[in-house]
Amino acid sequence: MADAKERFQNKTILITGAAGFIGANLAKRLLQGGPTVRVVGLDNVNDYYDVRIKEARLAELARYENFVFVRGNLADKALVTGLFEQYRPQIVVNLAAQAGVRYSILNPDAYVESNLIGFYNILEACRHSCDDGAAGVEHLVYASSSSVYGSNTKVPYSTDDKVDNPVSLYAATKKSDELMAHAYAKLYNIPCTGLRFFTVYGPAGRPDMAYFGFTDKLRAGKTIQIFNYGHCQRDFTYIDDIVEGVVRVMQKPPEKKNGPDGLPVPPYKLYNIGNNQPENLLDFVTILQEELVRAGVLPADYDFEAHKELVPMQPGDVPVTYADTAPLERDFGFKPSTPLRTGLRRFAEWYKQFYLADTSCQ
């Protein structure tokens, strides 16, 4: 496989969700490839979580002259169409979505608008990108989620498994995205690759994720709730591993070819990107606490036991997530490998700098 810096030279790459956790880190990685790699970022910068984190990510990206940012809503079809007409991206990475399992129970409209209508707009824009004789989009890479595995009990989760039993609206929208992408790949020969991400974490991550929310609550002296009485397991995947996986996938679109009937075989692939090593939630909390103390976010004498509560499973949650990453390793020579303690240490150090730069818990 060609070196990523060489592969993306003189390319325009559209990243939706560019102010988001994965989107911003991916954009930064691509922009470091040199001035001939142009990245166009789209994001509505909503207030689902602390906007200061999104603005800080964008401020870092703004230092690159070859980064263009457009603030707008993916569900605005005219806006999306105009972006494709103006910038003519060769590669599209759709990371914009309304995230969160539990929030989908409270605000389902946001998921239909962003995850369904927004993704449909991207597919339509990819479809029409070659209407005027232009080369069109070479590869659409889009974010799915480990949530699509729903109540499956077979582990590790394989992309060959049936995923017809979602336990949240969020999961249902992500499965719908996969189906729509497959249809567009078949109908219009658009190379599409879906990526099922597993519990992404790291510095400047999403505050609605457990590790971040636990940190906020512990720092405030509140009690953290550990669901399923601590028996949940999660395949925590460090942000740098996610970005490396996405970059490798971007370089290798599914091959266009015809079947025995002379019609195109859908140039379509699905991969898991996970750490392939699920961690028990109680062990995860213990490591997080130790790293928060080490970084100075919490005092050395913090009484953790007094701030833990074991509670039943939440609606929409699943007891275990565990990724089969063999196809990713086979096709791209890559397997996520960052140890949980290493990733949580980097998060704790970032948290101290971002939130406590002028104060001390010591």
Image (spheres, rainbow, N blue to C red):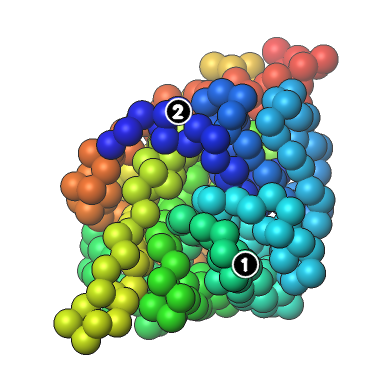
Type of amino acid under label 2: Lys
| Residue extending furthest toward the front | 133
From the viewer's side, name the closer residue of 260 and 316. 260
Q: Report the Cα–Cα distance between label 2 and label 1.
A: 29 Å
Q: Which residue is mark 1?
A: 132
Please identify the quarter of the rendering in which residue 96 is found.
Answer: bottom right
Whether residue 168 is visible, yes or no, is: no
Name the residue rendered at 69%, 50% in the picture.
87
Contact flag, marks 2 and 1 (Cβ < 8 Å): no
Q: Residues within 10 Å of mark 2 (few under 14, many from 20)?
A: some
Instruction: State left or right for residue 45 relative to residue 198.
Output: right
* Residue 95 percent across, percent down from the top left: 58, 54
* Residue 149 percent across, percent down from the top left: 37, 70
Type of amino acid under label 1: Asp
Q: Secondary structure at mark 2?
A: helix
Q: Residues within 10 Å of mark 1 (few under 14, many from 20)?
A: few
Instruction: Look at discs 2 and 1 and give the one toward the viewer.
Output: 1
From the viewer's side, name the closer residue of 156 and 293. 156
Instruction: State left or right for residue 325 relative to residue 137.
Output: left
Name the residue rendered at 28%, 36% in the picture.
1
Q: Secondary structure at mark 1?
A: loop
Residue 5, numbered label: 2
* Residue 106 percent across, percent down from the top left: 71, 73
> On the rendered image, what quadrant is the C terminus found in?
top right
Name the residue rendered at 38%, 82% in the picture.
164
From the viewer's side, name the closer residue of 221 and 70. 70
Instruction: State left or right for residue 246 relative to residue 315.
Output: left
Q: Is residue 139 above or below residue 330?
A: below
* Residue 107 percent across, percent down from the top left: 73, 73
Q: Is residue 102 above or below residue 45?
A: below
- Disc with the residue nearer the chain's start (2 vs 1): 2
Whether residue 65 is visible, yes or no, is: yes
